C-alpha cells in the first residue's frame, strides 16, 4: 500500500455473451468438421452451450463488481462464478494438471 491504493483481483466465471455462440460457430467450420478432431469439436460445442446456459448475466456480474468497488477495503481476491464450488474449492486444492486431464476426459480425448 505504498500509495494507499487497494487492489482487488476479480476472477470471473462464465458470463452469458455471444462469445460462446461465436466459438461454437467457428468450431462448425467445414475445415475443422472434416478433420480428425470433429468428434471432439462436437463435444466441445456442447460444452460451450452448457457454459452459456449456466453463465451469469452481464447485469448480475456488473452489479457484483460495482458492490465490491464501493467497499472501503475490498477483498484481495473475489471469484464471481456461477458454480462457486468449482471455482473456490476444487481449483484451489486440485492441480491444474488434474483439471486439464478432467477437461480432456470430458471432451473424450484418448488416454495416453
Image: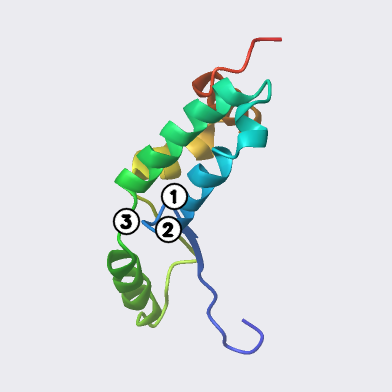
* The residue positioned farthest toward the bottom in the image shown: 3
Residue 95 visible here: no
| Residues at circles 2 and 3 in contact by the CB criterion of under 8 Å | no
Tag 2 near tag 1, CB within 8 Å: yes
- Residue 14 visible from this viewpoint: yes
Front: mark 2 or 3: 2
Q: Is residue 112 above or below residue 7?
A: above
Query: Mark number for residue 68?
Result: none
Q: In this figure, which residue is indicated by the disc labeled 1?
A: 21
Label 1: how many residues lie within 10 Å, few (<14), some (14-19) or many (20+)? some
Q: Secondary structure at mark 3?
A: loop
Task: Examine the rendered structure and indicate whether residue 80 appears above or below residue 70.
Answer: above
Q: Residues within 10 Å of mark 2 (few under 14, many from 20)?
A: few
Q: Would residue 94 be found to the left or right of residue 53 on screen? A: right
Spot occupied by residue 38 in the image (x, y as percentages of width and height) = 59, 25
Residue that label 2 marks? 18
The residue that disc 3 covers is: 56
Q: CA distance from mark 2 to mark 1?
A: 5 Å
Which sits in the foreground, 54 or 25? 25
**Residue drawn at (35%, 72%) of the image:** 62
Residue at image point 42% right, 73% down:
74
Amino acid at each position: 500500500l505504498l500509495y494507499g491504493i487497494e487492489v482487488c483481483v476479480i476472477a470471473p466465471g462464465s458470463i452469458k455473451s455471444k462469445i460462446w455462440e461465436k466459438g461454437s460457430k467457428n468450431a462448425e467450420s467445414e475445415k475443422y468438421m472434416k478433420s480428425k478432431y470433429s468428434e471432439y469439436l462436437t463435444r466441445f460445442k456442447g460444452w460451450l452451450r452448457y457454459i452459456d446456459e449456466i453463465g451469469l448475466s452481464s447485469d448480475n456480474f456488473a452489479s457484483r463488481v460495482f458492490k465490491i468497488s464501493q467497499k472501503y477495503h475490498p477483498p484481495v481476491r473475489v471469484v464471481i462464478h456461477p458454480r462457486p464450488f468449482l471455482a473456490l474449492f476444487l481449483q484451489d486444492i486440485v492441480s491444474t494438471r488434474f483439471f486439464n486431464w478432467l477437461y480432456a476426459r470430458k471432451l473424450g480425448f484418448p488416454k495416453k
